[in-house]
Image (tube, rainbow, N blue to C red):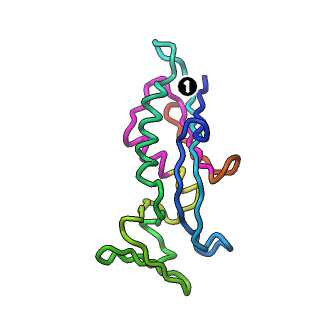
Amino acid sequence: MKIQIDGWITNLRFSASHFIPFHGKCQRLHGHDYALKITVEGDLGEDHMLFDFVEIKKIFREIIEKIDHHVILPSRSRYMDIQELEARVIVSFQDKEYIFPSEDVYFMDVEVTTAEEISRYIMERFLNSFTPGKNIERITVCVEEGPGQGACYEKVIKK
């Protein structure tokens, strides 16, 4: 059995800005309206359900609300020099320097803020908050940067 949640329709969406060093025009600060697409696969439980939609959407909403309307910066980048000074975050790479108010920044535990890394990050946060039932075999989290364009991270729960 496979269940899918389309964030464009169910409002699992967030807006944020980022940049990707050394990647053409994407190395300029820019933003996206992101949406999650979630797929859960497994066997029906004794209640004839795979999982509770309400519970899973609540957890994903809590994760993305923290990211929404922030500048996403990697917390472990080898490409940028990132300094937190008082109420500011200073980011330097190549010949550029950005200064952001600290409250406008969301640090993500990734090296680069690509859709691929963001999808993995969101999956990890989700699994820290949700214990899959024994009937769940696989979960896939896709982060779309616009309808039809995104990256997916899949986690096999049970083989």
Residue underneath mark 1: 42
Query: What is the residue that sits farthest to the left in this orientation?
Result: 86
Residue 78 percent coordinates (x, y): 48, 74
145 lies left or right of 60: right
33 lies left or right of 107: right
Image quarter where the N terminus lies is top right
Q: Is residue 88 magenta?
A: no
Residue 137 percent coordinates (x, y): 53, 30
Observer-nearest residue: 110 or 98? 98
Residue 33 percent coordinates (x, y): 59, 53
Which residue is at 38% across, 71% downward? 101
User: Which quadrant holds residue 82?
Assistant: bottom left
Few, some or many C-alpha atoms within 10 Å of disc 1 (few <14, some 14-19, many ≥20)? many
Compared with 159, 67 (above or below) is below
Q: Secondary structure at mark 1?
A: strand
Query: What is the residue that sits farthest to the right in this orientation?
Result: 148
Highlighted magenta segment, given as a residue range: 121-144
**How many numbered discs, if any?**
1
24 lies left or right of 127: right
Residue 14 percent coordinates (x, y): 52, 50
Observer-nearest residue: 9 or 132? 9
Observer-nearest residue: 83 or 123? 83
Query: What amino acid is at disc 1?
Result: Gly
Compared with 16, 50 (above or below) is above
Query: What is the residue that sits farthest to the bottom in this orientation?
Result: 95
Which residue is at 45% across, 42% downward? 61
Compared with 75, 35 (above or below) is above
Which residue is at 46% across, 41% downward? 60
